[in-house]
């Protein structure tokens, strides 16, 4: 929250695309520091914001369904040519109409709704509010994170973080065994979880430059979530 007080900290990383859950409305910013923005929310102090930079243009995809308010499909355009789709995610705690759609249950339903987009060059990223360690928890949801992972794998879509071999063991990180927390609940080190992800289609996965999670000491004063970064060398999008 209060992103207007924090955005300078992320600009030093020279992002092209930026997804900010719990983001205030852009009208609160005193300056335009981005090329384009799409924002959705019921509270001007706490919505989902997607920002682009370096002349990249973004717009709400025509398939957007308000039933999945915070799973946001975006068209990404460069030089008036659409190059890819993006789905920004902020998994919500509560669904008053249907409790099975809480958290990852809602993401599961939304991705099934947007299946056609999964066949295109795409990035699906944000706060999923879930780890596979909770898949068998007390919550009875429509889908678990494992279900989401398996669905995306059918389209060749994989998590960037989990696609990079560990520098020590040389094997990919297994879901549920992440060594880099993306959340320190209540900002406490002992309540550390990996719940933020960047899933991408094959053309991106095959050209990973780097993927890493920001360090506690660098980000905890700004948020209980650590920034998750991914860089790709991809230049062809078809």
Image: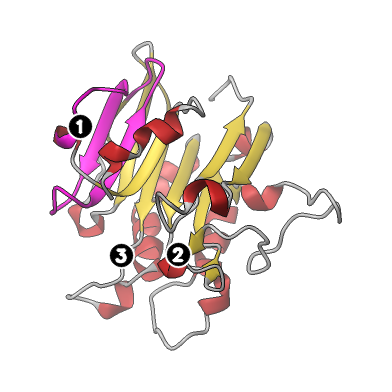
Which mark is nearer the camera, 1 or 3?
A: 1
User: CA gap, disc 2 to disc 1?
Assistant: 26 Å
Crowdedness near tag 1: few (<14), some (14–19) or many (≥20) residues, C-alpha within 10 Å? some
Which mark is nearer the camera, 2 or 1?
A: 2
Rendered image: mark on residue 183: none
Judged left or right of residue 236, residue 207 is right
Crowdedness near tag 3: few (<14), some (14–19) or many (≥20) residues, C-alpha within 10 Å? many
Q: Name above or below for residue 109 compared with residue 206.
A: below
Q: Residue 106, image x and y in percent? A: 34, 65
Q: Is residue 79 magenta?
A: no
Q: Secondary structure at mark 1?
A: loop
Q: Secondary structure at mark 2?
A: helix
Crowdedness near tag 2: few (<14), some (14–19) or many (≥20) residues, C-alpha within 10 Å? some
User: CA gap, disc 2 to disc 3?
Assistant: 19 Å
Q: Nearer the viewer, residue 173 or 9?
A: 9
Q: Name above or below for residue 168 compared with residue 212.
A: below
Q: Secondary structure at mark 3?
A: loop
Q: Which residue is mark 2?
A: 187
Q: Residue 73, image x and y in percent? A: 33, 42
Judged left or right of residue 60, residue 7 is right
Q: Which residue is mark 1?
A: 29
Part of the protein shown in magenta: 28-57
Q: Residue at x 64, y 25 (%)?
A: 233
Q: Which residue is mark 3?
A: 92
Instruction: Give the position of the C terminus as an image quadrant.
Output: top right
**Sequence-wise first label, 2 or 1:** 1
């Amino acid at each position: 929250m209060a992103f207007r007080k924090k955005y300078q900290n992320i600009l030093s990383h020279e992002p092209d695309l930026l997804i900010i859950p719990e983001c205030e409305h852009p009208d609160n910013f005193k300056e335009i520091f981005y090329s384009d923005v799409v924002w959705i929310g019921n509270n001007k102090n706490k919505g989902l914001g997607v920002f682009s930079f370096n002349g990249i243009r973004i717009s709400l995809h025509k398939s957007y369904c308000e039933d999945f308010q915070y799973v946001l499909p975006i068209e990404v355009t460069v030089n008036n040519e659409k190059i890819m789709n993006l789905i920004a995610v902020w998994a919500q705690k509560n669904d008053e109409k249907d409790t099975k759609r809480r958290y990852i249950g809602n993401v599961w339903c939304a991705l099934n709704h947007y299946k056609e987009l999964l066949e295109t060059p795409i990035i699906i990223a944000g706060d999923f509010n879930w780890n596979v360690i909770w898949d068998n928890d007390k919550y009875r949801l429509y889908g678990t994170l494992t279900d989401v992972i398996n669905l995306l794998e059918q389209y060749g879509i994989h998590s960037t973080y989990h696609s990079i071999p560990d520098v020590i063991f040389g094997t990919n990180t297994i879901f549920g065994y992440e060594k880099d927390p993306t959340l320190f609940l209540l900002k406490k080190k002992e309540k550390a979880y990996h719940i933020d992800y960047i899933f991408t289609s094959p053309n991106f996965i095959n050209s990973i430059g780097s993927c890493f999670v920001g360090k506690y000491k660098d980000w905890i004063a700004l948020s209980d979530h650590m920034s998750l970064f991914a860089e790709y060398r991809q230049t062809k999008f078809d």
